[in-house]
Image (cartoon, rainbow, N blue to C red):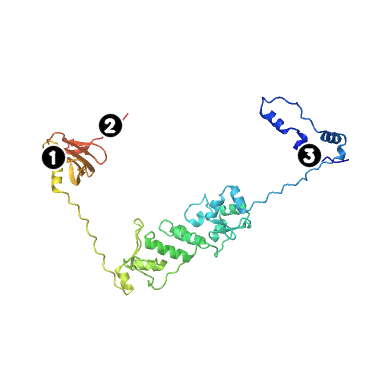
Amino acid sequence: MNAPRNMTIWDVIPDPGRAVASLLDPNFPPGPRRIPVPRRLGRTMRLFDAHPDEFPVMEAPVVAEPAPAPLDAMQRLVASGIANEYIATLGALRDPDAPFTPRSIGFPVEIRRVGGMFQPPTAPRIWQLHLSTPACAALPFVRRIEEVTGLKARWDPDFNRGMCGQWHHAVDLANDANWERLASSMEHTTPTAVARSAGIHLGYGSLSVINARRLLSAAGVAEPGTRSCPNIMPSSSSSLTMSLDGWEAVHAIEDGLVIPGNPKRSTFARVTEAGWRSLGKEPPPPPPPKPRKVKFALPAAEVAYVKDAIQAILPKGVPTYVREILYVGRVPRSKSRRLAEIVLWDGGIGRLEISGEPGAHGYRWRTTGGDGRPFHWDEAAKTWARVDEPEAD
């Protein structure tokens, strides 16, 4: 049987322009209701209906959908709701049930990608869990992270910040408020870190000498037999440029070589004259006193004018309510208007505005208190007093 030739739109629709116009324009003259089918196409369709087996139907092959790739450790962590990928890659994971201090327990585990974060998109996503301290492996939060990610957390001192967790544990707790917690949790830190932290807090004054002795003894840091302090390094202003180690800081403060700072004022330790002489140096001379600020001298005529203007409006025998005149100035584009900043009788700062000359037509004055409340002369108490304005309904 001859196969039908390749057919085009011209074989199916003899007049495609007329067909399209009849669809778009409702007023187009009606044509035949049925577009005639070419004879060759009609014959082929009848043959297909009569002999369907002679016309094989080509079916598209069925392609099975690929199985979804298994989630990696980070994706499982995100799916659990503990953290998103952006927060998880910033640093260690925050334990919501642990206190923020110390940071070693508040942020006990960190998830890191092998090879770093900046890799090609096709690079494999291999993750590792790193502990803040070796003892953090027993924390419930760390075990939960291991269960979710399917990884085993480990502590690696050669890791990027491997030793920071032990240092954070010591420096966060080596103060008067938390030194006992530090002494009872030495599994999270080292004696060396405790000694360095104690020296820092002694210099800032946040750890007393008595508590420092107790902490160093509990941490297993032995006191040296000699009380030498060779690491004192004062600056030209006698401030200690570098913190001392634990026992050296204790001895320096006890022997009067160093004065600890004040934590409330954020000051650090200072080297005394005895500390300078222990180094074989003379202490620097004291700094010269700072020059006193020169008070601005107001024009005597302006001050006298303000005083006379105030006294002219007060009843006879009533003292003035002005303790001091801070500033007197003329208003621009006005010949007789003056503004004055004054100290009121109660220490508040007020503003006095004077317009015109005393006794002349148009003379006005107005005083505004510092807190906005008016004041008056209390004849019974013989003093000036503020007036409490009634509250609006």
Disc 2 residue type (three-letter): Pro
Q: Amino acid at mark 1?
A: Gln
Residue carrying label 2? 390
SS for tag 3? loop
- Real-space Cα separation, disc 3 to disc 1, in angstroms: 115 Å
For image coordinates 60% across by 57% down, the residue present is 120
Q: Give how far across and how far down residue 180 sits, in percent.
A: 45, 58
| Mark 1 and mark 2 residues within 8 Å of each other at the beta carbon | no
Q: Indicate which disc, 3 or 1, sits on the residue closer to the N terminus.
A: 3
Residue 288, given in percent of the width and then of the height, sits at 24, 64
Q: CA distance from mark 3 to mark 2?
A: 98 Å
Quarter of the figure with residue 122: bottom right
Pointer 3: what residue? 7
Q: Residue 342 is drawn in which quadrant?
A: top left
Q: Residues within 10 Å of mark 3 (few under 14, many from 20)?
A: few
Residue 313, can we see it? yes
Helix, strand or loop at mark 1: helix
Which image quarter holds the N terminus?
top right
Above or below 94: residue 353: above
* Mark sitting earlier along the chain (3/2): 3
Depth check, front residue: 110 or 218: 110
Mark 2 surroundings: few (<14), some (14-19) or many (≥20) residues within 10 A? few
* Residue 14 shown left or right of residue 295 in the figure: right
> What's the CA distance linking mark 1 and mark 2?
29 Å
Residue type highlighted by circle 3: Met
What is the x, y in percent for residue 32?
A: 75, 26
Q: Tell me if residue 174 comes above or below residue 8 in the rendering.
A: below
Q: Which residue is the site of mark 1? A: 311
Q: Quadrant of residue 232?
A: bottom left
Coordinates of residue 146 in the picture (x, y in percent): 60, 54
